[in-house]
Image: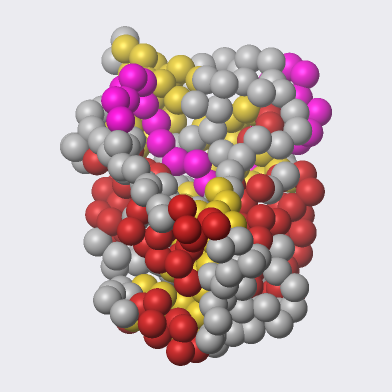
Amino acid sequence: MKTTAAVLVATGRPLEVLDLDVPALQPGQVLVEVAFSGVCHTQVLECGGHRGRDAYLPHCLGHEGSGVVREAGPGVVKVKPGDRVVLSWIKGSGADVPATRYRHNGGTVNAGAVTTFNRFAVVSENRLTALRADVPLREAALLGCAIPTGFGAVLNTASPRPGQSLAVFGVGGVGLCAVAGAAVAGCNPIIAIDLNDAKLALARKLGATHTVLAGDGVNEQLGGLVPGGLDFAIEATGRPVVMNQALACVRPRGGTAVVIGNARFGETLEIDPRQLNMGKRLLGTWGGDCVPDRDYPRFAGYLSTRRIDPRPLLSAGYTLDTINAAINDLAAGLVARPIVQLQPA
């Protein structure tokens, strides 16, 4: 069979929408009909060549999505044909099959254990999580990356107590999910910082109690809102200068900054060691320290009960044929989280 997919043929060039030959399933692999895919800043960096040398060109892209299982390969026990699933880059239980190779015009198109810019995708069993029936597939796509990374950075990595203060630097898709996670955790105040007024308005809808326009004097404004420093700061921009701002704004003796954002390849972070001598903590996080089999059903429950309402941050109107517009709009800050509909309406 064939699948239509958006393929990165060369960095710095638009994705090409190609018809690929789907290989036979290997043990531990699953064929998924992808319904919706989110677009992450990781794909913006990949397409622009900002993650270093790309040794796998040409290759498929996308690491968060939702869909329906159409075929299960030998040995797969976690899901079965007909199951609704979340596709995620974060490893869960099940077989770990690292790579898929599609064919196009006699050549090879590489893919990792999961891709979502395909109408049909061959996915490793451990990148799939069964999805409850009452969560719309369009919203469920965010369970593959944005929600676990943002929510997890707050609930798993920072782990605030109700009433503690928290700021989020950068309220794109992941940062907005961190805001929503802080609201679920009962943080107060919840302060959103961004350069984009429209994104700050979205942050208010998702639980921010205060918003601050990024730029010079941000930390002075935060000091006015929370004298003595914040309990927690979440950095979701990928910019080293903002990582320093996040560390500087938390309180001595226990204040914690958590870095989510992906910096461009070659960028480094220099910090004043006195910030650490003051008893502050600087933490990283790998996908919000989420365990998919534990956390994704919990987050899906939040979607079902509307403890998370992702609708304000979901874009509309992107298809596989307009996926380059989705990537460009995300890079330009015009949308919070582009959602691409993979199947024809």
Please identify the dominant SS of the magenta region. Answer: loop
Residue bounds of the magenta highlight: 52-79
Where is residue 181, by image quadrant?
A: bottom right
Q: Which residue occupies 61% across, 78% down?
A: 165
Q: Which residue occupies 30% across, 30% down?
A: 52
Where is residue 152, by image quadrant?
A: bottom right
Residue 134 relative to residue 30: left or right: right
Q: Nearer the viewer, residue 194 or 88?
A: 194
The quarter in which the C terminus is drawn is: bottom left
Give how far across and how far down residue 277 sits, in percent: 55, 57
Whether 68 is among the magenta residues is: yes
Q: Which residue occupies 52% across, 74% down?
A: 167
How has the structure been colored for display? Answer: secondary structure
Give how far across and how far down residue 211 sits, in percent: 44, 84
Above or below: residue 198 compared with residue 65: below
Residue 237 relative to residue 27: left or right: left
Residue 305 relative to residue 258: left or right: right
